[in-house]
Image (cartoon, helix red, strand yellow):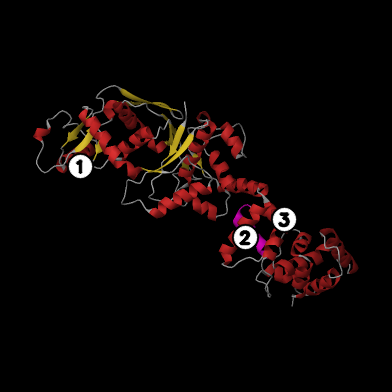
């Protein structure tokens, strides 16, 4: 079988983290089986669908590097096809016109509420002659569902799910204004697109039985269903904005790498032995539905930061500098000089060791972009330059300017020599130097910083101390 999966978001909001994981699982499953991953934009809700949301979904998928086969498919363009297929069922006697008035439907709802059950259409127009239709009522088209027996959904994650057909009423295919319902359109689109596996959140599990009945009514092969558990917050409750139910673009803006987010999302509900850090190549090779768990996963930002830190250490240096500079430009709304870019690249080893996100990396890299402004805002750093601190900095500048071989080793040797000549501990000299060069009391190795700054910039910063 040629495997075909699909991701089908509605452009009524951003691509949230749960949707991103669903897209990832579909993408991986198709790649693993050498199949196709399709993208369908379910934009039939014209009132709530927006071009901004549509653009955000596409941008989010591209940022995550989840490429789809061919062009994206827009559900709204298939409305005439959806209408025609419903009429086919009507002609074949597998659907019927229902002329229930609003008052009758309200009565059904009230009866159901009084009896403590959900609203179910009672089938009163199932076998009635349309000639009996009341005047002024535009009919809906309803599917004739089986009145007895069970509908079985052989779910690849949840296992066999059996639903008594008496629990399913005759669902609407076309509304009274002639527009198709979501449930009907989805089935037609999945068939027409050749979808073989429907992998989605288990909040759609209740739809699977109804959709199975509709596939059967058409005589179409039912795709394989796989309903994956939802992602919960750290407290085990439904994921909300306060937990991190944000758009994918928010995670990008928080400084996470797409590779890291894919790795993290992969491990939310899927496992391969005890592996935690899994490359894309490994994920494609290993991924299958039998390793998807049945319990909800929980967001863990500490874990996400740990995974992201790993990918920052592994990222190509030039790419990491590019991302860092882009974030700096965004934060200070000013360009970064080529000279400063070279310093960031030179000092990248020390910078990336401490960073868990691109944002942290960009903040740390500011020492190579802007000179400290005196008096320093950092109180701890400012105290390092008080009393003899400023004098030691200027003495260091006089010594360092004589060095020809500007390397970490020779710089360190010179600073140690100065400390010994003044009978001081090494830190008594190194800490004021750090404050003078970076404006902070914490940074990568001060000798790495001086090497990255270069001799001229280092001396200029030291001599600028008042």
Which is more toward the observer, 337 or 378? 337
For the view shown, which residue lies furthest in the front direction?
A: 70
Q: Which quadrant of the view contains residue 216? A: top left
- Pinpoint residue 284: horizontal percent, then vertical percent: 57, 35
**Residues packed near mark 3 inside 10 Å, few (<14), some (14 to 19) or many (20 plus):** some
Which is more toward the observer, 23 or 207? 23
For the view shown, which residue lies furthest in the top direction?
A: 149
Q: Which quadrant of the view contains residue 32? A: top right
Q: Say which residue appears at 40% left-offset and 32% top-offset.
A: 194
154 lies left or right of 387: left
Q: Which residues are magenta?
A: 356-367
Above or below residue 304? Residue 346 is below
- Pinpoint residue 424: horizontal percent, then vertical percent: 86, 66
Q: Which quadrant of the view contains residue 412? A: bottom right
Does residue 414 belong to the magenta stretch? Answer: no
Q: Secondary structure at mark 2?
A: helix
Numbered mark located on residue 350 in the image: 3
Foreground label between 3 and 2: 2
Q: Say which residue appears at 78% left-offset and 61% top-offset.
A: 451
The mark nearer the N terminus, 3 or 2, is: 2
405 lies left or right of 324: right
Residue 215 visible within the image: yes
380 lies left or right of 137: right
- Pinpoint residue 44: horizontal percent, then vertical percent: 32, 45
Numbered mark located on residue 176 in the image: 1
CA–CA distance between discs 1 and 3?
A: 66 Å
Q: Say which residue appears at 61% left-offset and 39% top-offset.
A: 279
CA–CA distance between discs 3 and 2?
A: 16 Å
For the view shown, which residue lies furthest in the bottom direction?
A: 466
Q: Which residue is mark 2?
A: 325
Q: Secondary structure at mark 1?
A: loop
Q: Secondary structure at mark 3?
A: helix
């Amino acid at each position: 079988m040629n495997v075909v999966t699909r991701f089908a978001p509605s452009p009524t909001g951003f691509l949230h983290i749960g949707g991103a994981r669903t897209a990832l699982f579909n993408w991986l499953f198709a790649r693993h089986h050498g199949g196709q991953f399709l993208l369908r934009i379910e934009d039939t809700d014209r009132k709530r669908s927006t071009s901004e949301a549509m653009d955000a979904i596409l941008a989010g998928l591209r940022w995550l590097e989840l490429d789809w086969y061919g062009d994206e498919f827009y559900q709204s363009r298939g409305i005439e096809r959806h209408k025609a297929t419903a009429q086919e069922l009507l002609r074949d006697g597998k659907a019927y016109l229902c002329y229930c008035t609003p008052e009758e439907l309200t009565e059904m709802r009230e009866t159901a509420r009084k009896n403590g059950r959900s609203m179910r259409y009672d089938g009163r127009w199932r076998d009635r002659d349309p000639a009996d239709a009341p005047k002024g009522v535009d009919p809906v088209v309803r599917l004739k569902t089986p009145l007895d027996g069970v509908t079985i959904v052989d779910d690849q994650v949840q296992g066999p799910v059996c639903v008594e057909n008496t629990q399913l009423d005759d669902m609407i295919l076309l509304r009274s204004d002639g527009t198709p319902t979501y449930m009907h359109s989805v089935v037609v689109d999945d068939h027409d697109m050749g979808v073989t596996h429907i992998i989605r959140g288990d909040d759609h599990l209740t739809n699977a039985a109804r959709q199975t009945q509709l596939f059967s009514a058409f005589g179409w092969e039912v795709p394989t269903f796989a309903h994956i558990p939802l992602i919960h917050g750290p407290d085990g409750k439904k994921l909300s904005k306060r937990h991190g139910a944000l758009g994918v673009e928010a995670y990008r803006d928080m400084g996470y790498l797409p590779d890291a987010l894919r790795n993290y999302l992969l491990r939310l509900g899927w496992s391969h032995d005890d592996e935690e850090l899994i490359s894309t190549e490994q994920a494609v090779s290993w991924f299958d539905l039998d390793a998807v768990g049945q319990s909800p996963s929980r967001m863990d930002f500490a874990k996400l930061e740990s995974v992201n830190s790993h990918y920052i250490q592994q990222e190509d240096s030039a790419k990491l500098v590019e991302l860092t500079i882009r974030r700096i430009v965004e934060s200070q709304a000013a360009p970064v000089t080529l000279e400063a870019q070279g310093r960031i690249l030179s000092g990248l080893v020390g910078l990336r060791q401490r960073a868990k996100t691109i944002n942290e990396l960009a903040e740390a890299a500011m020492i190579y972009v802007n000179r400290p402004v005196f008096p320093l805002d950092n109180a701890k750093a400012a105290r390092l330059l008080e009393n003899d601190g400023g004098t030691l900095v200027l003495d260091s500048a006089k010594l360092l300017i004589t060095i020809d071989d500007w390397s970490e080793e020779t710089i360190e040797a010179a600073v140690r020599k100065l400390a010994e000549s003044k009978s001081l501990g090494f830190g008594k000299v190194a800490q004021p130097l750090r404050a003078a060069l970076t404006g902070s009391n914490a940074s990568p190795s001060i000798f790495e910083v001086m090497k990255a700054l270069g001799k001229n910039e280092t001396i200029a910063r030291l001599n600028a101390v008042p």
